[in-house]
């Protein structure tokens, strides 16, 4: 099974006339709600700080962008270098955005120190998709990202995936604000003998609920730092149980704008949404532009079960 690009071209490009999205637009999260596709994407402009932009579409391919970002760094040292990689979903009647805060470590002298970067998994909530309220971090004081919420409670609790290098981990919460570190568990890690997912793995978009389990898209890179996507199936009521994890990747960089770019050989996805009988996988190419690849829902599920 392999994802198919909807075209040989990206679907969203940087805007040279914009101060905040002139350099790169990439790694979007997408929700399909009331017949509209809402896209939240990471953007970088002249100051090289990441902000989250917003665009809306009726077909998921052609977009109308908002001129201002919907989320910018808060001013807190943990976000001073940017807000990145939004994964967005609807849950219990509200919208949630899992994003990565990129910051400076502040030393005792109170000054920012450029050398030490902090990477913090944050969660924000919205009721209108445009104004976002920060709920707080999933965990503090460690390099942790690629976090995403499951789209419903499981056994009465909120569940998130996150990445403690080099593995994907699970976390549990009763209120989406407090995530007890003592309950965090590894889900799966890289497969050292397996080439494409030998080094590090992380979750892509919100897992898709199916009758056979949670369909999880994930990314991995190898020792050459080439990013690829895979899929697997998790138990519906106990997502710490991997039902099946196929050996082969389903997508990798091939187009020039994926192989080159701001960072070479990167496809990086924060959205895999089911629309009817298809899955739309939105991704950043080369940390520079946004592409779309799709597959049949049924074919993908069969591959995740038996591939
Ligand atoms: C990851 C994240 C992504 C990025 C990828 C490839 O660590 O920073 O935003 O797309 O690296 O550079």
Image (cartoon, grey):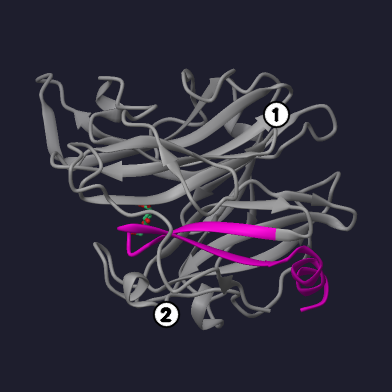
Answer whether residue 201 is visible to the viewer in this image: yes
Given residues 302 and 291, the one toward you in this image is: 291
User: Residue at the spot x=32%, y=58% of the render?
Assistant: 287
Q: CA distance from mark 1 to mark 2?
A: 35 Å
Q: Quadrant of the N terminus?
A: bottom right
Q: Quadrant of the C terminus?
A: bottom right
Name the residue that disc number 2 marks: 254
Residue 212, how many percent across, how many down? 88, 58
Residue 16, how many percent across, how many down? 19, 48
Residue density around tag 1, few if under 14, some if 14–19, many if 20 or more, within 10 Å = some
- Element on which disc 1 rests: strand
Given residues 125 and 53, the one toward you in this image is: 53
Residue 218, how many percent across, how many down? 58, 60
Given residues 190 and 230, the one toward you in this image is: 230
User: Residue at the spot x=81%, y=67% of the render?
Assistant: 298
| 67 drawn magenta | no
| Residues rendered magenta in the picture | 279-307
- Element on which disc 2 rests: loop
Name the residue that disc number 1 marks: 91
Residue 24 shown left or right of residue 185 in the figure: left
Residue that sits furthest to the right in the current view:
211
Residue 236 shown left or right of residue 71 in the figure: right
Residue density around tag 2, few if under 14, some if 14–19, many if 20 or more, within 10 Å = some
Residue 304, how many percent across, how many down? 76, 69
Answer whether residue 101 is visible to the viewer in this image: no
User: Does residue 125 sit above or below 261 in this rendering?
Assistant: above
Q: Quadrant of ligand 1?
A: bottom left
User: Does residue 279 sit above or below 209 in this rendering?
Assistant: below
User: Does residue 58 sit above or below 92 in this rendering?
Assistant: below
């Amino acid at each position: 099974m392999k994802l198919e690009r909807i075209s040989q071209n990206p679907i969203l490009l940087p805007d040279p006339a914009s101060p905040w999205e002139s350099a790169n637009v990439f790694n979007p999260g997408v929700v399909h709600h009331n017949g509209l596709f809402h896209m939240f994407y990471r953007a970088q402009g002249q100051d090289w700080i990441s902000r989250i932009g917003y665009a809306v579409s009726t077909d998921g391919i052609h977009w109308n962008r908002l001129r201002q970002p919907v989320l910018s760094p808060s001013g807190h040292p943990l976000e001073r270098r940017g807000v990145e990689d939004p994964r967005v979903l609807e849950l219990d009647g509200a919208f949630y955005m899992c994003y990565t805060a990129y910051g400076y470590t502040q030393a005792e002298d109170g000054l920012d120190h450029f050398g030490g970067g902090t990477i913090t998994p944050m969660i924000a909530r919205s009721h209108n998709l445009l104004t976002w309220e920060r709920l707080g971090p999933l965990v503090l004081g460690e390099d942790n990202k690629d976090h995403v919420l499951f789209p419903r409670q499981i056994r009465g609790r909120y569940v998130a995936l996150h990445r403690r290098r080099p593995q994907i981990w699970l976390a549990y919460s009763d209120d989406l604000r407090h995530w007890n570190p003592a309950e965090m568990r590894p889900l799966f890690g890289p497969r050292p003998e397996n080439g494409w997912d030998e080094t590090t793995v992380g979750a892509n978009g919100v897992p898709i609920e199916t009758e056979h389990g949670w369909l999880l898209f994930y990314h991995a890179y190898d020792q050459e730092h080439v990013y690829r996507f895979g899929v697997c199936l998790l138990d519906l009521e106990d997502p710490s149980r991997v039902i099946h994890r196929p050996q082969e990747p389903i997508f990798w960089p091939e187009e020039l704008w994926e192989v080159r770019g701001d960072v070479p050989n990167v496809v990086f996805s924060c959205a895999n949404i089911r629309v009817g009988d298809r899955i739309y996988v939105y991704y950043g190419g080369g940390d520079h532009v946004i592409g779309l690849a799709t597959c049949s829902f049924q074919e993908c599920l069969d591959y995740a079960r038996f591939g």
